[in-house]
Image: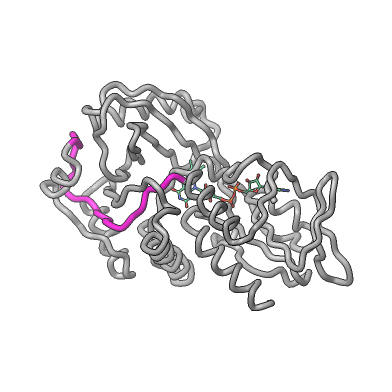
Amino acid sequence: MEAGPKPASGVTALAFGWVNLFYSDPTDSVSYELRRKAFTYHHALLRDQPVLFGDIRLGSLIWRNSADETEAVVLQQQQAGTAVELIDRKKLGQLEPHLARLPDVAAYVPDDIALNPIAFTSALAKAAASQGASLLFDQTVIDLVTANGRVTGVRTATASYAADAVVIAGGQGTAELVHAFVPDLGLSTSPTILFNFAAERQAIGRIVCCPNIEVRQIADGTVLAAKGYIDDRPENVPDVFGERLKTSIEMYFPKLGPLKLRSANVGRRPMLKSGMPYIGPVAALDGLHIAVGHPGVILAPLAGKIMTEILLSGH
Ligand SMILES: Cc1cc2nc3c(=O)[nH]c(=O)nc-3n(C[C@H](O)[C@H](O)[C@H](O)COP(=O)(O)OP(=O)(O)OC[C@H]3O[C@@H](n4cnc5c(N)ncnc54)[C@H](O)[C@@H]3O)c2cc1C
């Protein structure tokens, strides 16, 4: 059941679409292991059901402010088990021939996936429907229906739906729906911006992420860029920041031609205080489950798999 008119009606529509292990925290073994499983599962799906992924690009190139910093982070990720290579300026130039400003060294992650989160979500929903799932759009769940300490369904403004089990995967809307049973979910949102630029030419092959830009290009030439965390400072107003970002991207990739900012949208990423996602049953109410957390696009297929296994096992 989805409040919006179609799949990916929430913040997923504004995700950058980067599936990576590199930005996991190798010092936190539980979180790293979950992320590794999620990353591996994306690749298993990509191998077995490539149609779900549509038009993707593989590989990312990352560098920090100094060669020392880049080397340190690559070593740390390699020691944790991430498949990443430290490459020199020459190899970077071969991989991204239109990159005009090259650092001395960069991290090259050949298996990172850049996908379209809207198309991916729609394909997953379509695949579920083809296996017998009913997808109900424009249906806002306003409450859970319970009886004898068990969830027995959900309610919208106009109807009730019976269910043996309920999974709340409502992004930032999750907290309100489960509040009576999980008052301390600790869900908040962190604002980030997705920029969409029109470019004159193809020039960016892989995801490129360095101190000034996080950018990728798609088949129709559109350049997408994300700005990690934003606050209320005037220079962070999306349009103001977008103009500055445009200049930076043009500097790194002059072959793109002058960019034109089409849109700059703030998305609010649902995050739990613990830093870990919540994927599983709610102790206070039999049959109720939650699937929410960051980074949602990376975790989504694994979260779906975990939830399916839980539901099928009857726990
Ligand atoms: C700029 C930007 C870049 C990002 N880049 C990445 C990235 O590269 N990789 C990554 O993994 N993540 C990325 N993220 C984070 C990612 O977008 C989120 O983690 C993820 O989309 C969260 O998915 P979700 O399904 O939990 O939430 P949502 O996408 O918000 O989905 C929740 C859905 O539940 C529906 N809903 C809510 N309440 C109700 C209700 N009461 N009844 C019925 N339906 C309801 C909503 O309409 C919505 O469609 C990025 C986010 C932003 C903003």
* Residue in front for this viewpoint, 91 or 161: 161
Q: At 44% across and 44% down in the image, what residue appears?
A: 116
- Residue 229 image position (x, y, % from top left): 48, 42
Q: At 72% across and 63% down in the image, what residue appears?
A: 166
* Residue in front for this viewpoint, 145 or 29: 145
Question: Would you say residue 102 sits in the magenta stretch?
Answer: yes
Res. 213 in view: no
Q: Is residue 130 above or below residue 196?
A: below
State the image quarter where residue 49 is shown.
Answer: bottom left
For the C terminus, the quadrant is bottom right
Q: Which segment is the magenta one?
A: 98-116
- Residue 127 image position (x, y, % from top left): 54, 56
- Residue 53 image position (x, y, % from top left): 42, 52
Q: Horizontally, is 220 left or right of 135 in the view?
A: left
Q: In this view, does 248 lie above or below 295?
A: above
Q: Which scheme is used to colour this image of the protein?
A: one colour
Q: At 75% across and 45% down in the image, what residue appears?
A: 140
Q: Horizontally, is 197 left or right of 84 in the view?
A: right
